Amino acid sequence: MSVELHVERGRIRRVLPLADGVVVRTETTTHTFPGCFAFPGFVDNHCHLYGLGKRLTTVSLHTAASADECIRRLSAPSTTFSGWVLGMGWNEELWSDRSPAAFALLHAAFAGTPVVAMRIDGHAAWLNSEARRACGLDVDDLSVLLDADMDVIFKTMPTPTREEIKSMLLAAARECSSKGITEVHDMDVDPLWLEALRELAEAGTLPIRIQSFLRAQHDEWDEAGLLPAGGEFLRVCGIKLFADGALGSRGALLLEPYADKPDTLGIQLLSVEEMVERITRAIDAGWWSVAIHAIGDAANRNTLDAIERARAWEGGKDMLFRIEHAQHLHTSDVARFAELDVFACVQPTMQVSDASMAVARLGSSRQADAYRWRTLLDAGARLGAGSDFPIEEPGPLAGIIAFTERKGTERITREEALRAYTLGAHETADMAYRRGRIVEGNDADIVILDRDIATCSAEELRSTTVIATITAGVVRYQHHAS
């Protein structure tokens, strides 16, 4: 919208129509953006801030077209962590050779230097012999580690210093701000990172708001003695669980076997009973939100079953439940999202990047059960959107494009896509009462764009530029034309 906004103490006090452009007046400064349009600040409601910071400071393997190329990139790292070389983002789907021999190449390289390379989805790790030796693993085993088997890596690798962690988190937050993001929902947060985030928030250096969902798969929040905590820029609001793994590494739990590996249904990381036990213990401790990763159709069914049982508890009636990804859904489970008041927190750009892999893993006949955005909305479910960065790039505009330009019947409208990245995303953290709309009394979290993305053409949407990002009334990012 073209609008003049008066902002005091980080809140919108007056909203006045303008014929053209955007003007934002604070107590001390007036910002003028001729020919631009104001929208509620974008939210990425499922991401890994520390992971993005690590990606920005470690070896990127995201576009590597072979195991050889991965090894070449790992051979010249810009930084190491206490002598370990870390890489992120390999994807064997991009390689012409995906044989065990290709994975064996890493074992012969880097004598004396431990190397750990994480798959693009974060659910598989590729280690060289030195790293396996340091972790107490069989050095002759050439296989990658999947999901829970990776825990030994995290227990063995050197811990970054507080200042290193803060530097990574701040780099990630600034990257988000440049994309028009004013708030993220940070998933699977380690208590160690939380302390660094608190220091950044208290110092006033965070350019975005952070809703933290703490690591809970192995009761990490309980062992650290952490409970919900409020704050303007850092809010500890929930816990994060995993029902299954990822589709690419064949860890997503399916009702029927994988099309390209018929001897497996995937990996169950938590049973229904285990999820119920963790949820009810969180309820008793005072947590009000639980986010559960579920990608496969069997994992989504198990998660809905667990939530249904938890809703029967007195304390579970008002809990905010989210299923992260909700990627593959059996038709009989779709309506349960609305019936159980469960948010579907989806990542639209994954439908684009995973398209060929999803066909390989599931076969053509099961594609109708994948990424069911239109079906969920029509069934009364509420959607929030994110990217799952660093697996995907942070970028709500790309997500809106993916939502609205998808082929087939699951495409959603521009208005619905915008809502999923603004008001709808805020609903998934119970903050829609003060964010997600440009109205008097709401927080002044605003993105300034050079196009009216509510009405512009698809071609114009693809070339839209973030001109400025304003969080709590302060310009945190401003585009400078080259």
Image: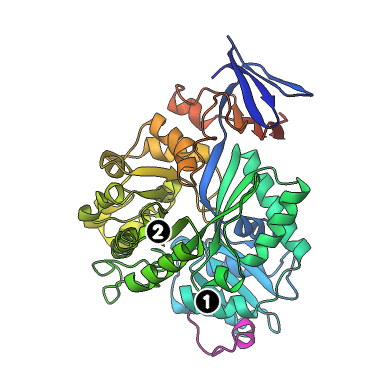
- Residue underneath mark 2: 315
User: Where, by quadrant of the figure, is residue 58 drawn?
Assistant: bottom right
What is the secondary structure assignment of the residue under circle 1?
helix
Q: Which residue is found at the position 36% from the left and 32% from the top?
A: 413
How dense is the environment of label 1, judged by Cα within 10 Å: few (below 14), some, or many (20 and up)?
A: some
- Residue extending furthest front? 314
- Dominant SS of magenta comes to loop
Residue 125 showing in the rendered view: yes
Q: What residue type is disc 1 on? A: Met
Sequence-first disc among 2 and 1 = 1
Query: In the image shown, does 187 or 427 lie closer to the viewer?
Result: 427
**Depth check: 78 or 42 in front?**
42
Q: Which mark is residue 150?
A: 1
Are there few (<14), some (14-19), or many (20+) residues within 10 Å of tag 2?
some
> Residue 99 sits in which quadrant?
bottom left
Judged from the image, the secondary structure of the residue bearing numbered disc 2 is helix
Viewer-side label of 2, 1: 2
Q: Disc 2 vs disc 1: Cβ atoms closer than 8 Å?
A: no
Q: Quadrant of residue 109?
A: bottom right
